[in-house]
Image: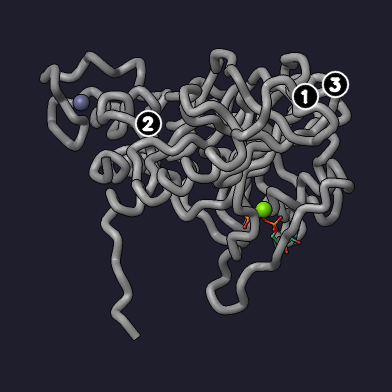
Amino acid sequence: MPPKRHLTKQQSKRTSQNNRKKLNAREVKVDDSQLGEPTEAQVIRHMKYQIDVLTKNGEQLKCHYRQNLGALVCGDKVIVQPHIGLSTGIITAMHERTTLLTRPGRYTDKKLVAANIEKIFIVVAPKPEVSDIFIDRYLVAAEHFGFTPILILNKIDLLPRPDAMDQRLEHFETVGYQTLKISVKEDIGLTDLKKEFKETTGILVGQSGVGKSSLINYLLPDANLDTSPLSDISGLGQHTTSAAKLFQLASGGQLIDSPGVREFGLNITKEQLAEGFVEFRPYLGQCKFRDCQHLGDKHCAIKSAVNEGQISDSRYQSYSSIYQSL
Ligand SMILES: Nc1nc2c(ncn2[C@@H]2O[C@H](COP(=O)(O)OP(=O)(O)OP(=O)(O)O)[C@@H](O)[C@H]2O)c(=O)[nH]1
Ligand SMILES: [Mg+2]
Ligand SMILES: [Zn+2]
């Protein structure tokens, strides 16, 4: 057998770009006279070479798009022209985005995750276990990109007592974040949670196996999304969901299910990181040195606030370790 060819990042990027061009070229051979009226629509899923949209009239179309539009992502509001008599179409324009969630990609510095979202629901569970820094990364992203974060503890049916994880949640409540405790399995706390989905576009994020798709299935039984138990060996989720997908809720809101991640990478500068810790803000600009990195300098206003108990040790540790990783 010939040795396996290892592609460099550049090569794989080029190969995938070429494949995409080929595919688009193949599909684009549609006579414009076969196209219907331009219609408002929203991207509900972006798979490798295909984009599913939902039109204002509730029609679902498989689409390709004009290259000059740039990358499109779940949540994007677009104009499509349906192919008459088919459930396909072409995306011809995109409306300006109100918000955009991105993270560093494997081959690019920015991978789009979702657009036009207002709330980010950070889903955690007693199992798989989660660290505070995992949550803090999402909170920083929420502050940076301008979403309202809500921390959801699912699977409370697995806890020995209802208050078993209260302290951990209180820690985030003290900083000012809303938290909710639920069990999708035993239908606990879901009425309050549903209120948070009304008249807004939200995204469910978190580790694999915390129950994001299970929650969508509870809200929309017809969605019939795949879910899987945690791995017996690692105790971790099995990365069941592979692409983000947007759902219309009966209450009028929209909710995006997203694939679980091991760690949420941040696309921000070191200065933006400090801004992303909301309770640091009153102290920023008060350090002795203008370029203070808040990593333990004696004359650092943030470090003093930590020493005086105004900022928690855990949040400060998250800051330091994310800082090192940027
Ligand atoms: N005990 C308990 N198990 C739950 C609850 N909600 C979901 N699960 C289980 O958790 C496992 C993982 O659920 P999924 O919905 O696949 O998790 P996910 O977050 O979508 O995972 P990925 O798609 O891999 O990111 C499944 O076996 C669910 O049945 C709950 O409230 N309690
Ligand atoms: Mg899932
Ligand atoms: Zn400082």
Of the numbered discs in the image, which one, if any, rests on residue 55?
A: 1
The verdict on label 1 being within 8 Å of ligand 2 is no
Relative side of 285 to 29, left or right = left
Of circles 2 and 3, which is in front? 3
Question: Please, is residue 76 above or below residue 138 in the view?
Answer: above
Task: Name the kind of residue labelled 3 in the image.
Answer: Asn
Quadrant containing the N terminus is bottom left
Of the numbered discs in the image, which one, if any, rests on residue 294?
A: none
Relative side of 108 to 290, left or right = right
Residue sitting at the far bottom: 1
The percent coordinates of residue 36 (x first, y second) are 77, 19
- Quarter-of-image position of residue 88: top right
**Front-lying residue, 133 or 138:** 138
Q: Earlier in the sequence, mark 2 or mark 3?
A: 3
Question: Please, is residue 316 above or below residue 8 in the view?
Answer: above
Does dot 1 land on a helix, a strand or a loop?
strand
Q: Which residue is drawn at 79% across and 33% down?
A: 60
Q: Kindly report the distance in space between the C-alpha atoms of the residues bearing marks 2 and 1.
A: 47 Å
The percent coordinates of residue 297 (x first, y second) are 14, 32
Asked whether disc 3 touches disc 1, contact meaning CB atoms under 8 Å apart, the reply is yes
The percent coordinates of residue 116 (x first, y second) are 60, 22
Q: Name the residue under label 3.
A: 57
Task: Name the kind of residue labelled 2 in the image.
Answer: Ile
Q: Name the residue under label 2.
A: 311
